[in-house]
Amino acid sequence: MRVYLPATTAMLRSLLDSGVLGPPPLTAFAVTPGLREWYLDDDMEDLEYAATLEAARGSLRLIDTDPAAALRRIVVAADVPDRAVTIRDDLDRGVVQLDEAVPLAAVASVHADDADAEATVAAAAESIIAADLGDPAAQEAVDDVEGYELSWYANQEIATLLGSV
């Protein structure tokens, strides 16, 4: 199953150093029944993009808790065995829990903000918890960052990405 894991630059460095993203359990996003129902779309590419956006929002939460993290949303796309995935649409649409660490070899790609998004990412990360709690001004700051497209990197380009942050 293809999953989208919210991450930070520190998590990517750990992935390169240890060869795995973990330890489990890991929260990720995927095309789940809840996501399909919410988006009412049968196009798999659109559904995967929606799961990526949910993971990017999750990355904001991680950045908010890690003052050393670069101000870039990071999403790791990985192909994991179905047996390692528990669908958790009861938590939020598209949420899955991974019961195994994700090896670097399972990483299909990494998606990350470019430098021009950093100020907007900073404002969104500072606002994400308030937005989750229903604050409309905070939600606007979070929505603003979604105007920036994430750039795509192959797993062998992770070191290059980290070198540019």
Image: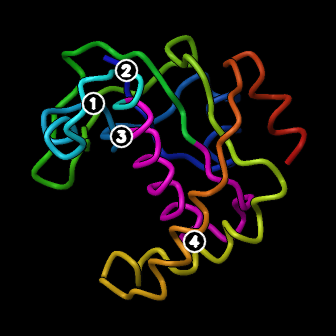
Task: For the residues labelled 4 and 3, say whether their Cβ atoms are less than 8 Å apart.
Answer: no
Task: For the residues labelled 2 and 3, say whether their Cβ atoms are less than 8 Å apart.
Answer: no
Q: CA distance from mark 1 to mark 3?
A: 11 Å
Q: Who comes first in sequence, dot 1 or dot 2?
A: 2
Viewer-proximal residue among 132 and 102? 132
Question: Residue 115 at what x, y percent from top left?
Answer: 84, 54
The amino acid sitting under disc 4 is Ala
Q: Residue at x 37, y 39 (%)?
A: 51
Residue 31: assigned label: 1
- Report which residue position mark 2 lands on: 2
Q: Residue at x 51, y 67 (%)?
A: 143
Viewer-proximal residue among 121 and 156? 121
Task: For the residues labelled 1 and 2, say whether their Cβ atoms are less than 8 Å apart.
Answer: yes
Q: Is residue 118 above or below residue 98?
A: below
Q: CA distance from mark 1 to mark 4?
A: 24 Å
- Report which residue position mark 4 lands on: 125
SS of the residue at dot 3?
strand
SS of the residue at dot 2?
strand
The amino acid sitting under disc 2 is Arg
Q: Residue at x 46, y 22 (%)?
A: 78
SS of the residue at dot 4?
helix
Label count reads 4
Mark whose residue sits in front, 1 or 3: 1
Question: Residue 63 at what x, y percent from top left?
Answer: 59, 63
Residue 28: assigned label: 3
